[in-house]
Amino acid sequence: MMMLLYIGNYVVFFALLGIKNRQLLVLSRTSVVITFSWIIVTCLLTSIYGSYDVGVRKSRPIIISVTLTTLINDVIAYLLLNIMNRNDDNNKTFKIEFVGIFVCIIIIHMIWIVFLTRLGNGFYFMVNEPEDTLVVLEDMSQEAFMRRIVGVFHKRYRITRVIESSCEDMEKEISGSATVFLYNLPMVRRMELIDLCFRKKKNVYFNPQIYDILIQTSRQSLFDDVTFLESRQGTMTFEQRIVKRLMDIGVSLLALIITSPVFLVAGIMIKAYDGGPVFFRQKRATINGCTFTIYKFRTMKTNSGNRSVTKDDDRITPVGKVLRKYRLDELPQFINILKGEMSLVGPRPEMLENVEKYTSEMPEFSYRLRMKAGLTGYAQIVGKYNTTPADKLVLDLYYIENFGILKDISLLFQTVLVLLKAEDSTEGFKK
C-alpha cells in the first residue's frame, strides 16, 4: 500500500501537468530530470520525516509526515518544470505557469494521503489483534503513567497485567504475554528479564539509561583478536565547530529578516495588552555551565514569578497563549544564536534553578552541558514541554553522542513537525 501511495502521487502529478506539458508523458529530458528529482527528494524527506508506517504510528502523525514530504516534493518538481519550460520552444523568460492545475494536484494528494492512511491503519488493526502486553515496574506508583503512555497505542498493545519486578512468577507472566514493557528497572534486574524475554521469544521494550546510550554509540575496536567496544566522548572536531557556527550565523540572520514582520506584530500586541515589556529575559545555563541571558517574547503577566509553566497556567496572557502554541515566543532567541550564546540545534537551556535541582537529583544531568544550548533539539522534537527531566536527559545525551552536521540539518527540518503538533509539544507540567 505504501508503493500505491507514492506511485499514485507521482501519476497524479505527471498526468495532470502533462495535459499542458506533453513532454512529461513521453521519454524526454524534462520527464527524466523531474522523475529522478522526485525519487531522490522522496527518499531524503522520508528518512527525515518518517514513512508510511501504518500499524506502527497513529494515523495523524503519518498523515502529517507524508503530507509534508509530498508538499515539498510537489513544489520542487513544479519549480523544476517551470525552469525547464524556459527554452526556445516555450518561454523566453522564466514564468510560473499552470498554478490552478498545481493547486488541484496538492488537494488530490492530500485527499489521497488521508484516505490511504486511514484505510491502511484501519485494515492493519482489523486483521491484527492487539498484543497481550505485560508491564513490569520497579514501583507500582508508576502504573497510571505507563497505562497512559502505552494506552495511546491501545489498538496495538492491550495491557493485560501490570506487576512489580520482584514478582515470583515472572517466567509464567512473561510466557503468557506477547509483548513486555520494562520501565525504570535496576540494570541487573532489567538484564535478567531481557534475557528471559529473549529465551521465551517475546517482544520487549525498555527505557534506556545513560549506560545504554554509551553502548549504543560505541564502535568496535580489535586488539589482536580480542574485540573491545570503544566509547569516545561526544566532542566536536574543529571543522565541525566552524561549520556549525557558520550555519548558526547564516540561518539566524535569514530567520531574523524573514520574521521581522512577526516581531513587529507580536511587539505591538504584547505592548497593547498590558503595557508591559515586550521581551522576557532570564538567566539560562549553556555549555560548561556558563550562563547567559535568553530572550523570548513575554507570554505571561508581569511579575509572574520564576517557575516552570503548568497546565492551564493563569499567568499566561491571551496573546501569550497564541505565541506559545505556535512557538513564536522563541523567535527572539535567534538574537542569542547570532551572538554565539546559543546554537540552532542543541539541548534546550534550562533555568538555573532547574539545573541545580535536577543535578542534585540526577548527577548525570550535568552531562547535557557538554554542548552549547540550542533553539531546537532532539528532546524538543520527539518529546514535549512536560517530558520528565530524566527522559529529556536521555534524549539530549543521545543527540550529543550521535552529533553530526547532517544530523543537525535533519533535526532542523523535523522542527517543522513540532509546529504542526503545537498543542502536544507545548503542554505544560501538571500543577
Image: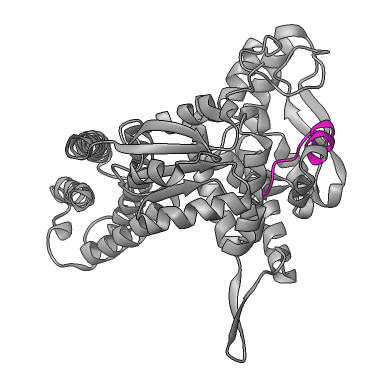
Is residue 87 in sight in this rendering?
no
78 versus 58 height, above or below: below
Q: In the rendered structure, which segment of residues is drawn in magenta? A: 345-359
Residue 57 picture quarter: top left
Provide residue 156's location: percent of width, then percent of height. Answer: 32, 37
Seen in the image, is 252 located left or right of residue 162? right
Q: Nearer the viewer, residue 158 or 106?
A: 158
Residue that appears at 21% across and 38% down: 112
94 versus 355 height, above or below: below
Provide residue 427's location: percent of width, then percent of height. Answer: 58, 24
Number of numbered markers: 0
Seen in the image, is 202 located left or right of residue 350? left
Q: Quadrant of the C terminus?
A: top right
- Residue 347, magenta (yes or no): yes
Q: Nearer the viewer, residue 322 or 164?
A: 164
Seen in the image, is 37 located left or right of residue 168? left
Residue that appears at 39% across and 58% down: 199
326 versus 254 height, above or below: above
Is residue 183 in sight in this rendering?
yes
Residue 430 picture quarter: top right
Q: Nearer the viewer, residue 274 or 3?
A: 3
- Residue 68, magenta (yes or no): no
Provide residue 267's location: percent of width, then percent of height. Answer: 70, 21
Spot the residue most to the bottom. Answer: 224
Residue 276 picture quarter: top right
Provide residue 253's location: percent of width, then percent of height. Answer: 68, 46
